[in-house]
Image (cartoon, helix red, strand yellow):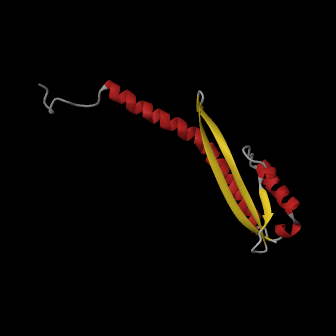
Amino acid sequence: MITKDKQRGITFLGLLIILGLIGFFAVVILKVTPLYLENSTVNSALDDLAQDAGIGKKGKKAMRKKIDRNFYINDVKNISAKDIAIEKSKEKKVWDVSANYEARASLFGNIGVFIEFQKTVEVPR
């Protein structure tokens, strides 16, 4: 009978399981991080649009052009300026600018990740 005094360390199988889990989560993090970084860029572009004092008076076309320029500079691939919804608010004198989109990343084989992002800002008219 083996006592607890003589038992030390981890078995090889236990080590493989731990390394496999670490590897799996590392792959998920490496594949998903660019999607969240791009979403941060989209959020920044919309916040920048909301902070621009006179852009709401120029209309939808000027707002789309500013968003498109920002997306081009920051190399945004999962959404375009055409996909941004720009509508007049019924209650307030503002434009509701919304970015609702989905991003996908392939992990390995036919297994992937699907993430939905949403952001809405108000731009004064």
Residue projecting furthest to the left:
1
Where 82 falls versus 17 (above or below)?
A: below
Could you tell me residue 1's position as x and y percent? Answer: 11, 25
Residue projecting furthest to the front:
90
Could you tell me residue 18's position as x and y percent? Answer: 39, 33
- Dividing the picture into quarters, in which one does residue 10 lie? top left
- Dividing the picture into quarters, in which one does residue 122 lie? bottom right
Q: Quadrant of the image for the C terminus?
A: bottom right
Left or right: residue 107 versus residue 67 is left
Where 10 falls versus 102 (above or below)?
A: above
Could you tell me residue 113's position as x and y percent? Answer: 59, 39
Residue sitting at 63 percent across and 48 percent down?
Answer: 116
Left or right: residue 65 versus residue 97 is right
| Front residue of 102 and 38 | 102
Residue sitting at 33 percent across and 25 percent down?
Answer: 12
Could you tell me residue 74's position as x and y percent? Answer: 74, 49
Residue sitting at 88 percent across and 67 percent down?
Answer: 58
| Front residue of 6 and 59 | 59
